[in-house]
Amino acid sequence: MQKEFPEAEVFEIKKVELNSPIIFAGFVGAGLVGPLAINHIIEKLEMKQIGVMRSKYLPPSTVFMRGRLRHPFRFYANQDGTICAIICEITLRMEGLYYLVESILDWAAQKGSKEIVILDGVASTEHDDKAYCAAEEDLVRTMAEKDISMIPQGFITGIPGGILNECLVREIKGVTLLAKANKVAPDSGAAATLIEAINRFYDMDINTKQLQDEKDRIHTEFSELSQKYVEHREEIAGMYM
C-alpha cells in the first residue's frame, strides 16, 4: 500500500554531521531576493544538498534550471557542517504553512542550531543599497553597529513570518535581513546588498561581484518565477479586498 504524503518532513538525502549550524533561509518574495541570495551563498560556499522538504501542502511543481531538474524546496550544508541553507523556489499557499514551519524548526533544533536568518525583499520602486533587520532587541543593537538599520515597524507574512513567530517561543534566535527590492522583477542588486550585510555581521567573505555583473542572465532565468510571485500576491490581495 502506498504511503500517504506527510504533513511536512525534512527528508535527508545525505547524512552529514552538523555542528550547531547557523541557518540562512530564502523564500519567494519581492525581487526574489531570498532565493537569489541563498543560491549565491550555496554556490560560493560550495555547499552540498543534504535534504528536501516533503509535504502534501507543497504545490505539485518542480523546477528546471538550465535544463536540470531540481526539487523546489532544498536544504544544504557546508563541508564543516557549521552553515546550512534553506531555499524554496515556489510560491507557498497559507494552507499547511504551520506544518512547514514546525518541520523546519524541529529539524533545526535536532541539529543544535541556535540561529536562523531569513533573507527577504520589501517591495519598492527602487533599491537603496541598504540592509535592514528585524530581530530580538540585543541583536538589533549589534547589527546597527555593522550598518544594518532597524525596521521601525511593519508586517512579515507567510512562511518567514511563521518561522520568526515560532522562534520567539523556542530556544533559537530568529532574524530577518531585508532589502528594498523591485516589486515586479528579480533584483540581484538587493540580493548582493544582503550578502554584504551577512559578510559584515557574520564575519564572512562571500564575493558578490557575479550577482552584480550577471543581472541580465539572472533576470532571464528567474523572470518566470518572479511573475508567479506577483500573480500570487495579487491573488492574496484580492481575497482580502
Image (spheres, helix red, strand yellow):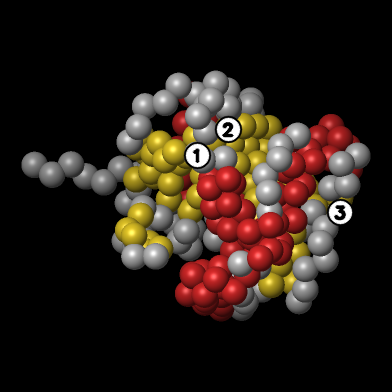
Between tags 3 and 2, which lies in front? 2
Q: Residue at x 50, y 50 (%)?
A: 87
Instruction: Indicate which disc residue 152 carries.
Output: 3
Amino acid, disc 1:
Met
In this rendered view, identify the residue nearer to me: 40 or 11. Answer: 40
Q: Residue at x 57, y 40 (%)?
A: 45
**Mark 2 and mark 1: Cα distance apart in space:** 9 Å
Which residue position holds label 2? 83
Say what secondary structure mark 1 lies in: loop
Q: For the residue carrying disc 3, how many other residues have a C-alpha within 10 Å: few (<14), some (14-19), or many (20+)? A: few
Looking at the image, is 236 positioned above or below residue 50?
A: below
Q: Position of residue 140 (x, y in %)?
A: 83, 40
**Mark 3 and mark 2: Cα distance apart in space:** 29 Å
Between tags 1 and 3, which lies in front? 1
Amino acid, disc 3:
Pro
Which residue position holds label 1? 47
Amino acid, disc 2:
Ile
Say what secondary structure mark 3 lies in: loop
Whether residue 202 is visible to the viewer of this picture, yes or no, is yes
Quadrant of the image for the N terminus? top left
Quarter-of-image position of residue 7: top left
Say what secondary structure mark 2 lies in: strand
Contact (Cβ within 8 Å) of mark 2 with mark 1: yes
Quadrant of the image for the C terminus? bottom right
Q: For the residue carrying disc 2, how many other residues have a C-alpha within 10 Å: few (<14), some (14-19), or many (20+)? A: many
Q: Residue at x 79, y 41 (%)?
A: 200
Between tags 2 and 1, which lies in front? 1
Q: Residue at x 75, y 64 (%)?
A: 180
**Mark 1 and mark 3: Cα distance apart in space:** 34 Å
Q: Earlier in the sequence, mark 1 or mark 3?
A: 1
